[in-house]
Amino acid sequence: LANDIILAVETSCDETSVAVIRGGKHILSNVVSSQIEIHERFGGVVPEIASRKHVESITLIIEQAVKESGLTLKDMSAVAVTQGPGLVGALLVGIVAAKSLAMALDIPLIGTHHIAGHIYANELVHNIEYPCMALVVSGGHTELVLLEREGEFRLIGRTRDDAVGEAYDKVARALHLPYPGGPHIDRLAVGSEETIDLPRAWLEADSYDFSFSGLKSAVLAVINQTRMKGLHLNEAALARGFQESVTEVLVTKALRAVHQYGAKQLLLCGGVAANRGLRAALTERCESDGVPLLIPPNSLCTDNAAMIGAAAQLKLKRKQFSDLDMKADPGFSL
Ligand code: KG4
Ligand code: ZN
């Protein structure tokens, strides 16, 4: 098992990625080809273009990942692929490629959940202990997931509207910042001395759900009012106010969940885990509460196939294989 070699494929959104993973823990290669430059001028991911780009790149990326691993296709024990959630046309490209490999090499196919991948990215650099709580924050997701045991996921809270990254990207767009806007807002926020006070969406007292659309509207209202009055907008202060509101709610709910469920660790994952404000606030709260905080390096927080290989190892162990007629599942639940 420690020597199982998984070839993993991830094409759920705008990254074409293929990785080779040994024993679910060791990255032999992890090639990520980003389409950000192509989608940038549209201000967001265009699904049809994403699919076509995946088709153009997938074969080359597979070849490159195998070559960089120092192994050959014959060495692979299984092929893993993101089955969902994601853009259906984009998922399909990875799935067709993975099925072809599984068939040609006569090895098992493992359909893998994208969020399980984000969570198990932590296992590539740390040792996860159970029970643990995962805070998944990305362009498409904002979720609190309890793992009582290895590979057992229980969704305890999620966003009721925008995902965190999505809210970041929308606010950035209103400030005419390039796509994806998260890192730009982060940079402005961290560099600002001043702040603008914005609402916090706590929802019901015992709820672990999130909501960011009200906050986003509050930000847009500030921008519009300032522009209408012909006043100067302190964009950095607004970015900081936005980041403070997001961070306070995420940190407070995550730690409340950790304590309520007796989690031994808090795992931060997804593209927004790169956010410096969130990292700093979580680090501080976890230190004062005595909770170990696990965060993968940035390259493993954004979409990549290595994380899919790490999550697939759990299914390989249990021989939970997929049939060759496996379908893409855009709304795949954990
Ligand atoms: O996980 P990811 O690469 O793709 C999805 O599965 O969605 O996450 C991308 C998201 C984008 O919305 C991007 O703006 C956001 O992560 N992001 C950030 C930062 N870096 C990336 N958001 C806030 N602060 C950052 N430093
Ligand atoms: Zn993702």
Image (tube, grey):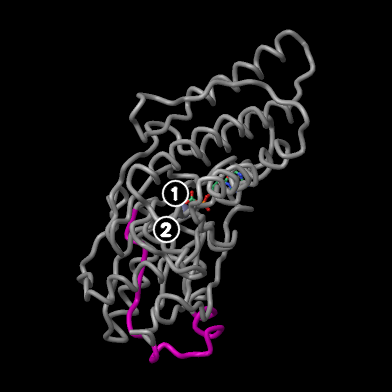
Q: Which residues are magenta?
A: 63-84
- Give the quarter of the figure containing the N terminus: bottom left
Q: Nearer the viewer, residue 295 or 138?
A: 295
Residue plotted at (27% across, 86% down): 106
Left or right: where does residue 179 sit relative to residue 309?
Answer: right
Q: Is residue 71 shown in magenta?
A: yes
Image position of 204 with respect to 274: above or below? above
Separation of residues labelled 1 and 2 (CA atoms): 7 Å
Q: Nearer the viewer, residue 133 or 233?
A: 133
Q: Secondary structure at mark 1?
A: strand
The numbered mark, 1 or 2, whose residue comes first in the sequence reads: 2
Left or right: where does residue 36 sit relative to residue 66?
Answer: right
- Image spot of residue 254 (x, y percent): 44, 42
Image position of 257 with respect to 111: above or below? above
Q: Mark number for residue 136?
A: 1
Q: Secondary structure at mark 2?
A: helix
**The residue under label 2 is which amino acid type?**
Ile
From the image, tell me which residue sits under label 2: 119
Left or right: where does residue 320 sit relative to residue 215?
Answer: left
Residue plotted at (32% across, 80% down): 78
- How crowded pointer 1 is (Cα within 10 Å; few <14, some 14-19, many 20+) is rated as many
Q: Is residue 310 shown in magenta?
A: no
- Image spot of residue 99 (x, y percent): 30, 73
Q: Are marks 1 and 2 in contact (CB under 8 Å)?
A: yes
